[in-house]
Image (tube, rainbow, N blue to C red):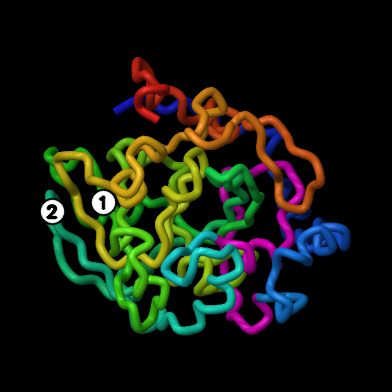
Amino acid sequence: MARLHLPLIPSGEITPEPVYLNRRRFMQVGTAAVLAPLLPSAQAADPLAGLAPLSSRPGPFGANEPLTDIAAVTGYNNFYEFGTSKTDPAENAHTLRPHPWSVTVTGACAKPANYTLEDLLKGQALEDRVYRLRCVEGWSMVIPWVGFPLSSLLGRFQPTRNAKYVTFTTLYDPEQMPGQRRSVLPWPYVEGLRMDEAMHPLTIIAVGLYGRVLPNQNGAPLRLVVPWKYGFKSIKSIVRISFDETAPTTTWNRAAPKEYGFYANVNPAVDHPRWSQKRERRIGELFRRDTLPFNGYAEAVASLYQGLDLKRNF
């Protein structure tokens, strides 16, 4: 595994705790006005108002940038299991039943089993993690996630030396996920990471955002967040984790291998075949900004890919 270099985020970029705890001051009226044509007309002023609050603590990482409006975070999503329009998940995800929930763990580990959600969350200390999210289509957000390091979960299963990759699978249930009734992707959705990527302290399992339980449209009850990779890598509504010796065939790589590679690292030097990745539009802003290598997390993660051709391994 590549050696980690700490601190991962310069202290000047870490959001001060008082500022984060008063995060709703970041929400500007202008943001909602810009997004109004894109969001469901029935979107409430606070889409998380009915969800239970989570008890969390300030995490070690942050992005010193204005947070994306809560209405955009919960109302403008890619989640093809509920439809291909950005507003479909917020409109359709009420059919998902995130409780009860279980995750099946298989492969090269000492403790394969079927674990309930309660089993997985037991003893996990939830943290606030303010991360940038960059989607391959060219838009981005800054989201205050609530979660815990993926490494603290994977370690419980005691992966063996043969575990070189970890594979995640989304729920497949067309009754709950009506978008799966259409063959827009090979279902169920599958994603994967190298073990060193999975064990990196920036990689988290999110169970909430904005201090509340994760909404269905954002991947309830468990989703992956890998902030230096494009958003499609952060798989939602996870029901299976497998420790594997070889790299899995991931969903978007299987559907369009010339467009979506296994690594999916944010790289402005590697264009999507149908559009440039050099610039991005932060949701809520009128003008585009330069895309940062590794989504701004290069200091923390570039060493993972030392010697790897990132243009070929995109």
Q: Residues within 10 Å of mark 2 (few under 14, many from 20)?
A: some
Q: Residue furthest right?
A: 29
Position above or below: 255 against 39? above
Segment tinted magenta in the rendering: 48-77
Q: Within the magenta stretch, is there residue 73?
A: yes
Q: Nearer the viewer, residue 168 or 138?
A: 138
**Tag count:** 2
Q: Within the magenta stretch, is there residue 126?
A: no
In the image, residue 218 lies at what x, y percent?
52, 66
For disc 2, the marked residue is 107
- Amino acid carrying mark 2 in the image: Gly
For disc 1, the marked residue is 167
Identify the residue at image location x=48%, y=33%: 273
Image marks 2 and 1: residues in contact by CB distance under 8 Å: yes
- Label 2 and label 1: CA atoms lie apart by 10 Å
Q: Nearer the viewer, residue 79 or 61?
A: 79
Pick the quarter of the image with the C terminus.
Answer: top left
Position above or below: 244 against 179? above
Identify the residue at image location x=58%, y=78%: 91
Identify the residue at image location x=68%, y=80%: 49
In the image, residue 299 lies at what x, y percent?
54, 26
